Image (cartoon, rainbow, N blue to C red):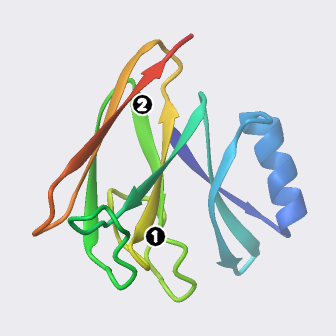
Amino acid sequence: MSVQVFVAANARDGLARIRRELGDDAVVLSTRPHPQGVQILASAYGDLAYITVEVVDQNDAVVKYADNTVTFELQGVGELIAVGSANPLSEELYVGSQRKAYQGRLMAVVRSAGQPGEIRLKASAEGLKAAQVRLSAVS
């Protein structure tokens, strides 16, 4: 995956440029103000998988107050392109391999590398049992 930075006078111009250069399937990872208008991080390649991660108790109920830092490890023919928690006050970047849970939940976005094979995503946090999901990428 190639994450690219685009700077444009406004979001509409930036998105048009991303579409021209990366294609209609490009994914916007983040936006932020820039002295010249707006800065947009975007990526393109294969299909996306949105994986919900939940911090649960011994009865498999989501722990609503959990804010554990969860670390993600990806192996195989894919790439971890974003991690989010829906926390409206968080200033954590979406790009990276770890994030604090918000109300016991997170989401990881995985993109296939455009070739068939297996993708394994592992989520772990201190004091909690790790979990892993296996995905199959097809051409």
Residue 30: percent from left, percent from top: 61, 64
Mark 2 lies on a secondary structure that is strand
Residue bearing mark 2: 78
Residue at horizontal 34 percent and vertical 76 percent from the top: 63
Residue at horizontal 83 percent and vertical 37 percent from the top: 20
Mark 1 lies on a secondary structure that is loop
- Check disc 1: other Cα within 10 Å, few if <14, some if 14-19, many if 20+: some
Residue 84: percent from left, percent from top: 49, 65
Towards the viewer: 102 or 81: 102
Quarter of the image where one finds residue 96:
bottom left
Mark 2: amino acid: Gly
Quarter of the image where one finds residue 7:
bottom right
Residue 46 in the figure: left or right of residue 133:
right
Give the Cα distance between marks 2 and 1: 20 Å
Residue 115: percent from left, percent from top: 48, 14
Residue 10 in the figure: left or right of residue 115:
right
Towards the viewer: 31 or 38: 31
Residue at horizontal 25 percent and vertical 59 percent from the top: 71
Residue at horizontal 76 percent and vertical 46 percent from the top: 18
N-terminal of the pair, mark 2 or mark 1, is: 2
- Seen from this angle, which residue lies furthest bottom? 89
Does residue 51 sit above or below 77 in this rendering?
Answer: below
- Check disc 2: other Cα within 10 Å, few if <14, some if 14-19, many if 20+: many
Residue bearing mark 1: 93
Towards the viewer: 4 or 36: 4
Mark 1: amino acid: Leu
Does residue 81 sit above or below 10 in this rendering?
Answer: above
- Quick check: marks 2 and 1 in contact, CB under 8 Å? no
